[in-house]
Image (spheres, rainbow, N blue to C red):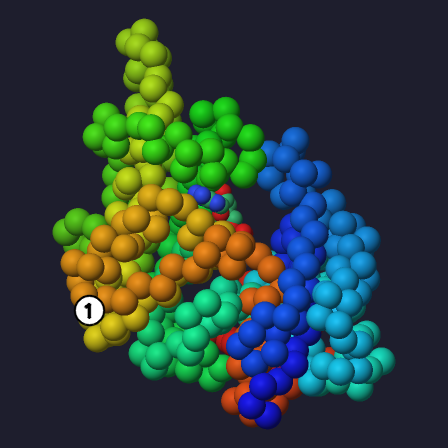
Amino acid sequence: MSEPLILGIESTCDETAAAVVRGKTLVSNVVASSMDEHARYGGVIPEIASRAHTESFVPVVSQALADANIELSDVDAIAVSAGPGLAGCLAVGVSGAKSLAWAAGKPLYGINHVIGHVAVTQLQFGDIPENTLALIVSGGHTSILHVNNIATDVSVIGTTLDDAAGECFDKVARLLGFPYPGGPHIDRHAQAGNSKALRVPQGLTQGKAAAAHPYDFSFSGVKTAVARWIESQVDQGNDINVDDVCAALADSVASVLANKTMKAARGLDSSTVIVGGGFSANSQLRAALVDAGKRYGVNVRIPEIRLCTDNGAMVAMLGSNLVSAGVKPSSADFSIDSSMSLNTICMQ
Ligand code: KG4
Ligand code: ZN
């Protein structure tokens, strides 16, 4: 099947989303977010997110089909995020997708959400070349993946040993009094600050640690360093320049991410790097990747912001790849996997 028509459903965290993709063309894309209901708690509350999915599932899927001007019976297959993510949230999407697949007699693919972040870039840039590297950065993940074939051959080259990049930003944002999610606030303030005003450590970039973990990341020391610096300034009676703190943090995190990814590209002889996940909306990271890509002679694919955040298009696109590659659908009794390995593309 060269141009399969796929319905993709996403419910790993706080977005209930559905989209229709034909081949590598986006036909419809509907996203409902429960973020406003979590903001006052300073983070996503799983139970609130799960309930929001149960309320939004039917309207969102119906809207995606209506916008595409099709009926469920028209699709060739359904794809749904089976993990990684919040268990209760995944359960809503997967049960809903199983019901639709069973009722309409359609094949169902329980796909890996994180690999969906890589797959979605095809909607903007076309096919993913063999031997491509993908830097996946979000609130929950920071990993470098080696993508030989998006439907059949993806492996992990490096990952964070502790906090994810988004998580690190969100923690520092909390220290600075920004609302959740803090990443975009840090991005904005960083644009007005001086990144050299304080030193923020760059984890696993020096000596033995760098040699043992060339493509791994560590961001847990960053929050501590920023917290200590703020304390010392307060002790000395100095005003805190929030813009400078944000600029130093953003500069440190962006340059570690960009430099390690380019070193991995050189090490694996990859000429293309893809970036994906919510944190890839970060302007300092986008600039650092463009710059590092030029220095290393690597072609960098940075998707438009609406493709970076969680949506159904990423799920439908990976589903389309799986169908085109002739991968068999997930078995009827596949389960959710909240900590799904990034080496798994699709549940069997
Ligand atoms: O992929 P995503 O939407 O959800 C997860 O799967 O985690 O990523 C959300 C993360 C949050 O940590 C948020 O603060 C961060 O991405 N983020 C940003 C920006 N936009 C979103 N971090 C820094 N700069 C941004 N512009
Ligand atoms: Zn995500």
Q: Quick check: 260 left or right of 50?
A: left
Q: Which residue is mark 1?
A: 266
Q: Is residue 315 above or below residue 102?
A: above
**Position of residue 313 measured from the top left corner of the image (x, y, whole percent):** 59, 66
Q: Quick check: 242 left or right of 345?
A: left
Residue visible at 53% across and 77% down in the picture:
24
Label 1 packing within 10 angstroms: few (<14), some (14-19), many (20+)? some
**Position of residue 75 measured from the top left corner of the image (x, y, whole percent):** 72, 81
The quarter of the picture where residue 54 lies is bottom right
Q: Is residue 206 above or below residue 346?
A: above
- The answer, for residue 140, to whether it is visible in the render is no
**Position of residue 166 measured from the top left corner of the image (x, y, whole percent):** 45, 46
- Amino acid carrying mark 1 in the image: Arg
Name, please, the residue furthest toward the right.
Answer: 103
Judging depth in this view, the residue of 88 and 286 nearest the camera is 286
Q: Quick check: 295 left or right of 76?
A: left
**Position of residue 70 measured from the top left corner of the image (x, y, whole percent):** 76, 75
Judging depth in this view, the residue of 341 and 8 nearest the camera is 8
- The answer, for residue 145, to whether it is visible in the render is yes
Name, please, the residue furthest toward the top.
Answer: 237
Q: Is residue 35 above or below residue 225?
A: below
Q: Quick check: 7 left or right of 301?
A: right
Residue visible at 58% across and 86% down in the picture:
3
Cβ of mark 1 under 8 Å from ligand 1: the answer is no
Residue visible at 38% across and 55% down in the picture:
160
Judging depth in this view, the residue of 319 and 218 nearest the camera is 319
Q: Quadrant of the N terminus?
A: bottom right
Residue visible at 71% across and 49% down in the picture:
49
The quarter of the picture where residue 159 lies is bottom left
